[in-house]
Amino acid sequence: MACSLLLTILPEELVVEILIRLTDLADLARAASACKPLRRLITSRAFLARLHALHAKPLLGLLHLERDRCGFLPAATDVAAAVARASDFAFSFLPDHAAGWRLRDVRHGLALLSSSSSSSYLSPLGDRGFFPDVVVCDPMRRRHVRIPPIPDDLTAGVRRIAVEHFDYLLAPAGRDGSSFRVVCRPKLPKQCDVTIFVFSSGAAFWRAAVLDACAATEKLSLPQSVHGYVYWRTHSSSTLLMLDTRDMDFFFVNIQTNKCVIGEAEEVGRLAVFNTIVDVGVHKVEILSKAIRGGADEPWRHDRTIPLLPGYKWRTARMAEGYLLLHGIVGNNSWSTPGIELQHFTLDLKTLKLESLCASISRGRHHHPQFDLYRSFPPPLSLSSI
């Protein structure tokens, strides 16, 4: 009530000027959780642009995806705690769906959910859908956008085949994070062509790319993204199948090992791999890079080697938002031990500062959680022509 009264008494422009002058980002996060009008102001694209010009984007914690559920592991800061209180990671704001919602991916503070992949239900629009319904959600603002169905002219070839399931990826599009891509891959029998569908929130339409079955001879992992490209690891060799989402063409890139973390190099257009190595008893992160396009014959370039804290066994987990996420276990513990406590660390790739991020989490015997770094507030969700 006090918030609504404040916005009634003062012009919105003046409230914005007051908020932008708050020096503690935790106060700003608490204001955003106080009421919907203040949350709308603080999380608007214009306000966030001004805020990020004044303050470095804070690292708020980890989004934790396991068994189709999403959790937030906040960093040990007041602003992260305030964001945790303001957000709804149970997605209770979503409309009910007859087939139920399944969490598929988390990326840059957003979440992608789909309905059941069964074709036996009626979609909210009243049609019997072959492809699942898909939504992209912002747990902080408790908002979602529904992704339009893939057009029939793009899916005619796939509809004639028994689809095992659908793999999805939520990928950023654009430097400011204000737009996104949804990548959908129907899992088809081995003898079928690989078909990929890509939706861009900026253009608000779907496109398709097809790779001949003769070229796709290996089983593919879940999709990931780097520098505007989408890639799949192959299971039996150190090769990446890559898709350029600008012109929708496929190509292959060789990597040195299938156990490395792949991410963006500091130079645009270069692919980086992050390996943990042991050199004279000291654990280190080794970073190599090469050009994504036109670099088939280019050797991997050694960019740097960074020593890690002693007393831990280390694994690289993910690279995002300019940070490398690492997992550490203490002493002589084994990675295969059920219930082992994973400790989360971030390595700032600009300052090379290694910090403990948030509380540890137990690793299950069969279920290995997926993590994504949550940094600052994501821009508002929008589809440009919908």
Image: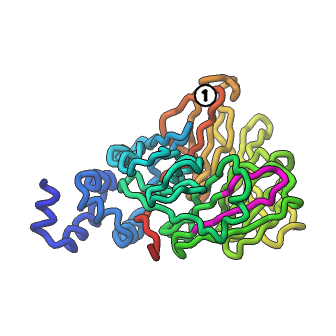
Q: Does 157 sit above or below residue 361?
A: below
Percent position of residue 257, x then y? 82, 48
Question: Which residue corresponds to the image point at 68% horizontal and 39% vertical from the top-left?
Answer: 315
Tell me the magenta residue range.
185-199
Under circle 1, the secondary element is loop
Q: Nearer the viewer, residue 10 or 284?
A: 10
Q: Classify residue 90 as left or right of residue 339.
A: left
Label total for image: 1
Question: Which residue corresponds to the image point at 56% horizontal and 38% vertical from the top-left?
Answer: 66
Residue 256 visible in the snapshot: no
Residue 196 sits inside the magenta stretch: yes
Image quarter (top left, top right, bottom left or bottom right) of the N terminus = bottom left
Question: Which residue corresponds to the image point at 22% horizontal and 66% vertical from the top-left?
Answer: 18
Q: Nearer the viewer, residue 85 or 100?
A: 100
Q: Does 49 sit above or below residue 186?
A: below
Question: Which residue corresponds to the image point at 53% horizontal and 56% vertical from the top-left?
Answer: 128
Q: Classify residue 343 as left or right of residue 91.
A: right
Residue 131 sits inside the magenta stretch: no
Q: Which residue is mark 1?
A: 364
Does the magenta stretch mainly form a helix, a strand or a loop? strand
Percent position of residue 123, x then y? 48, 55
* Snapshot quadrant of residue 296: bottom right
Identify the amino acid type marked 1.
Gly
